[in-house]
Amino acid sequence: MTTTTAQFRERATIALEDVRLQQALDGATGRFATARQAALAAIPWADELRDHFKAIRAATLANLAEHLQTFERQATAVGTHVHWAQDGAEACAIVTEIAQRHGVTLATKSKSMATEEIHLNAALAKAGVRPVETDLGEWIIQLAEEPPSHIIAPAIHKTKEQVAELFERESGRPQSAADIPALTAEARRMLREQFLAAGMGISGGNLAVAETGSVVLVTNEGNGRMVTTAPRVHVAIIGIEKIAPTWDDAAVWLSLLARSATGQPMSIYTTVITGPKRTAALDGLPDPDGPEEVHVVLLDNGRSPLVGSKYEEVLQCIRCGACLNVCPVYREAGGHAYGSPYSGPIGAVISPLLFGLDKYPALPHASSLCGACQDVCPARIDLPRMLLELRADLVTQGIAHGSEAVLEGSVSLAMRSERVWALLMGMGRVGQRPLLKNGKLALPERFNPGGERPLPALAKKSFHDLWRDGEV
Amino acid sequence: MTANRIALFVTCMVDQIMPEIGVATTRLLRRAGFTVEFPMAQTCCGQPFFNSGFRAQALPLAQRTIEILEPYEAIVIPGGSCTGMIRVEYPHLLQDNPRWYYAARRLAAKTFELSEFLCKLESDDWRQSTANCQETVTYHDSCHMNRILGLHDEPRRLLQAVGYTIAEMEEADRCCGFGGVFSIRLPEVSNAMTAEKLRQGRATSATTLITADPGCLMQMRGMRRNDDTIQIKHLAVALEEAITGKPWSME
Amino acid sequence: MRTRTTILTRLQSNNRALAQPTTWQSRQGFNDLAEQFVTALTAVHGEPHLAPNLEGATAQLGAILAELGAQRVVANNEAPIADLNLPTRWPHLQWHIVGETAGDLREFCTYADVGLSSGIAAIAETGSVVIHSGSAQSRVATLFPPVHIVLLPTSRLTTDLFTFTATHKNTHLANGTLPAAMTFISGPSKTADIEQTMAIGVHGPKRFIVILYRE
């Protein structure tokens, strides 16, 4: 995937012209944002808690190697197999190898951005394993063969009619779009069969707790519990930055995660996985159920080079999606415009950082720098600052267009002399005359850089001239 | 706030496109008893270049702006975004050079956005008026003014002080879609954002949408329909109209 | 191993001395934890009940089972459930007591009407019940059936996540005592993935009933 300015504009235009999508985006982001605000307002110390959380995340990243090793040690002690993956290819190879070793042909998955990031489903399919997404939204877009368009509400762009059609095709039974509970019940029926049949459960991890070697999964539907309970093998793929050193840290993390994401005080299910089912639990007797094997894949994929860099702060992200819901660009353009599993302000920053600035040159500019994202971020990540840094990198790495550099360079040069600048503007005043209409420039839309928005005309007299002529 | 030599930094947009904002700002400051000076060498603070990633091109503009404004005791700017650039970004941009860094810090400490400056004045004689303003307006929070400078109440306080009634929009602090070069880089998205802002403005009982930032003003005027019932004005112009009791005139 | 070394070396070279902040202390204060729990759980579509004692709670449980028309019930064999002699008390129901009843637990749970458990703690602020897996605590028993009923003494209530971690740091949350699965349950399974319309009961239980009793 790449996202150039032309591609962003093209995809955004499709979204802007889709009336239903616009309604869905407005509705969903608005509801999430309002709920978040109310949930944080309900705890008067929310701002201090966020500061505290930021301090936790910063300190954790400063000592990340140590915490990862603690996690590895504790997880291994309870029987979890810990793997390290440098990139997506390594991570996919690890997972497919485990699947093949166990003769797995069907794997159920709970929603995971990390697996979206490494395109695990395609790798599994190639290895003869059928991956079935079980988060309802994620399953809908899997059936539609589309990428997610929101970090926590992947099918935000789908209407109930489209969902009914997809379910009809999948189940072979007629479905009523008017009845969302019935559609949900149908999904429960169809996916329950998959849960019971799957040989492997694949999940992400909202966080990992180093001191006990635990992986924490947060879901509302219960699919996170299903994939970590029903199949014989559970594999969790988790970014190396998502470590909480202690349970004290995890408590702060969990206090902010659901509140920021959906405005819930706590998601319905917070599942803590600490190793496979015990052959001898505390009382010496074996657990009656649970997976026999648990694997955790610690995924780097471009993260470790960010530690210690000017972009380190972005690793404090916990993927709550709050920044998407308040982003005026996301709310118009939708998630697909970004061309990355990560959309919105956080996506505009981490997609170029993880997958290459040359591949996503449009994303640092897909923001008006309004700062709404930073306002709501539970870790208060300064996303506008990162966008500015990325824009500067585009220039210094020579990714920005040469023509842009020439234009910026010459305008800057002209502005370094008030006389040259005034002369140029004076020429503009003469040149614009044939185009003037109601104080705006009447350029044909096709040639107008503002699109349907006419550019403003230069005033008859500049303020400089008014002042000089004693007219102020 | 007492200052003998105050300088007006009008911003490049006001200078070339909307000079009436500079005129209104000057009139307000004179009403408050200041002798306003206009350093003729000023052009642009450099923000468009900085925000586009062209820091090497922004740097000389920042340095010359510092040199031009250095002699004054206070600098007033009728725009939050350019004020934010000088106050917050200049020290960042110049942090590697101690001499320039401290010069930037000194300038930052005496540079004010218009409403911020007016709210700091001890006397409010400047806004005494016999006119009876009855208008209901709505106020758009410019992003940088609101989030970088934290100026949210100041413009509203001034508007109410001169007699306006404020009818708030659903999301007064939602971006108007300008974002500098963003507005021509991604015009479709930018325009959709502006359309949403104007929709929210029209949905209030206000007859005028007021902003304190020239960039937002230009953007919203660009998307305003000719038959629109809602007017879009800069804070300085709106304050002048209420104080004089007359529609804005350059005369 | 090469990957591990590469990642760790890169991270270590950027290691900085930055201390983890001191533990956040709970600032939440509720007059009555049980009342707060009831309010919070009700808000998330859970069904809390408050009984004066275990006897009352058991009666309440009987009434709920009858009202549900439950026939097959799976129960985690833990206190206080283990002491209630459920199969003798309600012999007309088909019981699977985890670790005691012979037969396929998973198969039973697949068709069970109700899963019954206790919990190690309950969090008043959020209306959450914390359950552990163990030899007598099945994970699917509280997951597969359409109804999950929890029987819990009010003494296990704690204010919020912070008091929970502080209280259980050396017990339930310590190394070696944490079971394979610990789950915080805060209501019935739900989704809003289709047009942001809330629907209850996607994959987990559709009803989450908590009977709290005072001791």
Image (cartoon, rainbow, N blue to C red):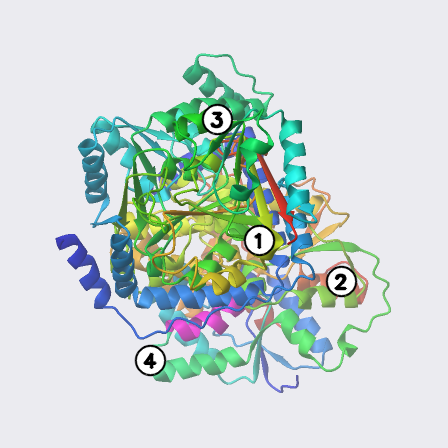
* Residue at horizontal 52 percent and vertical 62 percent from the top: C162
Q: Position of residue C185 (x, y in %)?
A: 52, 45
Q: Nearer the viewer, residue B44 or B166?
A: B166
The amino acid marked with disc number 2 is Glu
Asked if the residue at tag 4 contacts the one at tag 1, i.e. Cβ–Cβ closer than 8 Å, the answer is no
Q: Main secondary structure of the magenta part?
A: helix
Q: Position of residue A101 (x, y in %)?
A: 18, 33
Viewer-nearest of discs 3 and 4: 3
Viewer-nearest of discs 3 and 1: 3
Q: Chain of mark 1?
A: B
User: Is residue A416 shown above or below A16?
Assistant: below
Q: Which residue is mark 1?
A: B218
Q: Chain of mark 3?
A: A
Q: Is residue C81 visible?
A: yes
Q: Is residue B198 left or right of residue A412?
A: right
CA–CA distance in space, label 3 to label 1? 52 Å
